[in-house]
Image (tube, helix red, strand yellow):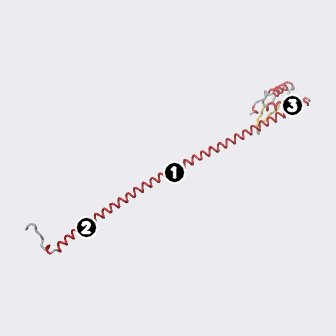
Amino acid sequence: MFGRKRLVQKGKMTKLCRERDGWKYERYPFINGCRHYVDFQRVFDNTSRMASRCDAAKELMRYYHEKGDYRKAADYALGYQQANDSVIRERQFDLTRNAQAEYHYQRNKAAEEALVRHGERVRLWSIVGGLLCVIAVQTIVVTYFYRKKQMHETIIGKEKEIGKAKNLIAQKETDLVASSICANPSCARPISFRSV
């Protein structure tokens, strides 16, 4: 910012010194005033930076006050006040602009974080939905094969029952044929095909 450069040269006007609470201006004493007055006057008249103009007006006000020219000291005090007001307005404008930039940054950061959270939620629910679909397909496949196995076992069981029933029917037929042959009086003697 504006407070880091020397205004003219070391020893002629002001320099910056570092203190615990921040930067502050340290005034060099006037030595036979004239040469320094010219340097301050040049800075006050030619600079476009309000902070430099403010510092030069303050030093010129002190110079003319020490010299006893109170009219010029009052003029430079007015110039100092105007330059100081401009510096304060610039600082307030910078603070306002910085606050707005910080607000927009925080708002954009919050919106970006909301988008990231939304993306994570979508990803999570996509994974959960995919797992549910896989589980549903596995359940359908297992149920299909389980029912197919049950039907196959039922068919095999019915075929065994049918086979047993066929054997029982065949045995009953042979028993029935054997009993009907024995119940006939002509069945008393066995028929021999050789004698015929």
Q: Quadrant of residue 98?
A: top right
Quickly name the residue at label 3: 76
**In which quadrant will I find the C terminus?**
bottom left
Q: Which residue is at the front of the view, 129 or 56?
A: 129
| Quarter of the figure with residue 101 | top right
Residue plotted at (59% across, 47% down): 118
Judged from the image, the secondary structure of the residue bearing numbered disc 1 is helix
Amino acid type at image mark 3:
Tyr
In this picture, residue 74 sits left or right of residue 148? right
Work out whether mark 1 precedes mark 3 in sequence or the reverse, and give the earlier one.
Answer: 3
- Residue matched to label 2: 169
Q: Closer to us: mark 3 or mark 2? A: 2
Q: Residues within 10 Å of mark 1 (few under 14, many from 20)?
A: few
Q: Nearer the viewer, residue 71 or 151?
A: 151
Q: Amino acid at mark 1?
A: Gly
Of labels 3 and 2, earlier in sequence is: 3
Name the spot of residue 24 as percent of width and height, x first.
79, 35
Task: Name the image quarter holding residue 11.
Answer: top right
Q: Dots 3 and 2: beta carbons under 8 Å?
A: no
Callout 2 amino acid: Ile
Q: Which residue is mark 1?
A: 129
- State the SS at label 2: helix
Residue 185: image x %, image y %?
Answer: 14, 75
